[in-house]
């Protein structure tokens, strides 16, 4: 398959990773097409001119947990990207808050916290576990349900409202009443379905040894050294020196050094499948290739295939997306926060335009500055902001709630407002079946196409990198005989 000509659509972290794994597995020729003038997708770092602080308009940290976390650390290790670990003992790892019932509430960060009644909850959290134990088996088996419904059924309404719902806001800016339980809690959901309870299933798996995930085949020899270090040193998460955008930049640099062509400002306008492969219609040219790996958002991919495969386009279009406002703020003092931590989330039941606030300067050293990132909108964007809010309107709202929630009365010295349109896919109930249907269609019609990235296999950095790897490794070598 060394002679396979492959096109990768999209120069975000998933597309670049797909290019990396294609290069590693099959060699060249290989071209990555990115419609914008930069790589990285929604990962974007802005360094202030004196370099004393940075703004992240997308993700800023990565978790080193599990198989997907180990896979990313292997990539980071091979690219020699300098990183900044945050240990589990760090304040940003220990302290996570929600704003509810008019006050800032610290979430429990130790087993001891399960036995105290902490606001906004009206009873100790261990009672939620007891609720799961006494609820027993579900009356009927489910293929899927909303994560809110699952949490309310197993652990009670307070957990669904004040723990699960804000967590979903933080992960995908979505409404837990619509998001699939298989998106975040698939293993817990399956344990409940199999054993009649989440806690029963967890305990049974632990004592039977079923909790360990097999990584055989993913890593050639042993686990990556960085992953072993992260486990030994108990990293909770990590960032990248000079901001997370250095990761996609390092990937692009590596690919360029290995003769992979990364074409920026080059949009693919349509795909035409034939017996010899695929023809890509670009602005100024038509390019034939044998295979396409697409990391594009599902709605963009739908437009490329709709003429020849309208049914596939309809399935892709069925994956919804939301708009998110990100407001970065910098203050000259580092003594403005009364409580330190990773940040806070706002439960939707509070009916506020905020999704949450990240305390960037608590996570990483910012040279005497307080740096915050306010996230707003998501599933509720139109409800709160209408069609075309101005940057000033959005900044004013963010400043107002920072003042109200964090008691920071001064205006930020420096700020940046980004409206990220259709940036996060929503894994609504039935998402897993939708993705299986999309890939089944591709396989049935023998299309020389692979789809990877946030639209399908998880929205986190680890998820999209592993998605790219698995789709590339599923490609079968072509016989040259």
Image: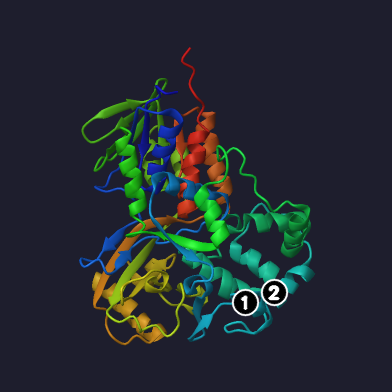
Residue for point 36% across, 81% down: 402
Q: CA distance from mark 1 to mark 2?
A: 9 Å
- Image coords of residue 235 (percent x, y): 52, 62
The extreme top residue here reads 481
x, y percent for residue 352: 43, 77
Q: Nearer the viewer, residue 453 or 193?
A: 453
Q: Earlier in the sequence, mark 1 or mark 2?
A: 2
Q: Nearer the viewer, residue 91 or 275?
A: 91
- Relative side of 33 to 228, left or right: left
Residue at image point 36% right, 48% down: 12
Q: Residues within 10 Å of mark 1 (few under 14, many from 20)?
A: some
Q: Nearer the viewer, residue 33 or 281?
A: 33
Secondary-structure class at tag 2: helix
Q: Is residue 431 visible?
A: yes
Is residue 130 shown left or right of residue 335? right
Q: How many numbered markers are drawn?
A: 2
Q: Position of residue 400 (x, y in %)?
A: 33, 82
Q: Label 2, on which residue?
A: 128
**Quadrant in which the N terminus appears:** top left
Discs 1, 2 touching: Cβ within 8 Å: yes
Position of 78 with respect to 266 (left or right) is: right
| Residue wearing tag 1 | 158
């Amino acid at each position: 398959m060394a002679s396979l000509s492959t096109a990768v659509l999209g120069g975000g972290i998933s597309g670049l990773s797909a290019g990396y794994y294609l290069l590693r597995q099959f060699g060249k020729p290989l071209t990555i097409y990115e419609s914008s003038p930069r790589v990285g997708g929604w990962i974007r770092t802005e360094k202030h001119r004196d370099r004393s602080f940075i703004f992240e308009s997308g993700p800023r940290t990565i978790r080193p947990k599990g198989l997907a976390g180990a896979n990313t650390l292997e990539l980071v290790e091979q690219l020699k990207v300098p990183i900044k670990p945050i240990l589990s003992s760090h304040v940003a790892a220990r302290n996570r808050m929600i704003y509810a019932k008019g006050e800032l509430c610290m979430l429990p960060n130790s087993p001891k916290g399960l036995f105290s009644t902490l606001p906004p909850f009206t009873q100790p959290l261990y009672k939620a576990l007891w609720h799961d134990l006494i609820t027993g088996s579900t009356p009927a088996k489910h293929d899927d349900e909303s994560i809110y419904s699952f949490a309310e059924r197993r652990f009670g309404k307070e957990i669904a409202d004040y723990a699960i719902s804000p967590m979903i806001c933080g992960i995908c800016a979505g409404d837990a009443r619509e998001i699939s339980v298989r998106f975040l809690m698939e293993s817990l959901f399956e344990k409940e379905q199999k054993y009649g309870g989440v806690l029963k299933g967890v305990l049974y798996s632990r004592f039977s040894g079923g909790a360990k995930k097999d990584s055989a085949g993913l890593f050639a020899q042993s686990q990556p050294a960085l992953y072993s270090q992260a486990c030994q040193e108990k990293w909770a998460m990590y960032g990248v020196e000079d901001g997370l955008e250095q990761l996609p930049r390092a990937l692009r640099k590596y690919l360029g050094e290995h003769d992979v062509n990364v074409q920026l400002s080059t949009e693919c306008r349509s795909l035409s499948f034939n017996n010899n492969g695929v023809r890509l219609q670009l602005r100024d040219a038509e390019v034939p290739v044998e295979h396409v790996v697409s990391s594009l958002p599902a709605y963009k991919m739908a437009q490329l295939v709709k003429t020849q495969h309208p049914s596939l386009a309809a399935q892709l279009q069925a994956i919804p997306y939301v708009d998110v406002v990100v407001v970065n703020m910098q203050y000259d003092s580092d003594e403005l926060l009364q409580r330190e931590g990773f940040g806070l989330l706002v439960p939707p039941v509070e009916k506020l335009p905020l999704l949450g606030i990240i305390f960037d300067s608590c996570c990483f050293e910012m040279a005497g500055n307080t740096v915050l990132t306010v996230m707003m909108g998501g599933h509720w964007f139109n409800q709160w902001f209408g069609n075309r809010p101005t940057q000033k309107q959005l900044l004013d709202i963010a400043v107002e709630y920072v003042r109200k929630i964090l008691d920071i009365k001064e205006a930020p010295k420096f700020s940046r407002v980004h409206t990220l349109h259709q940036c996060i896919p929503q894994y609504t109930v039935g998402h897993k079946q939708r993705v299986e249907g999309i890939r089944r269609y591709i396989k049935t019609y023998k299309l020389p196409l692979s789809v990877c990235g946030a639209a399908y296999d998880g929205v986190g950095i680890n998820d999209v990198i592993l998605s790219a790897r698995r789709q590339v490794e599923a490609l079968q070598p072509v016989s040259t005989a």
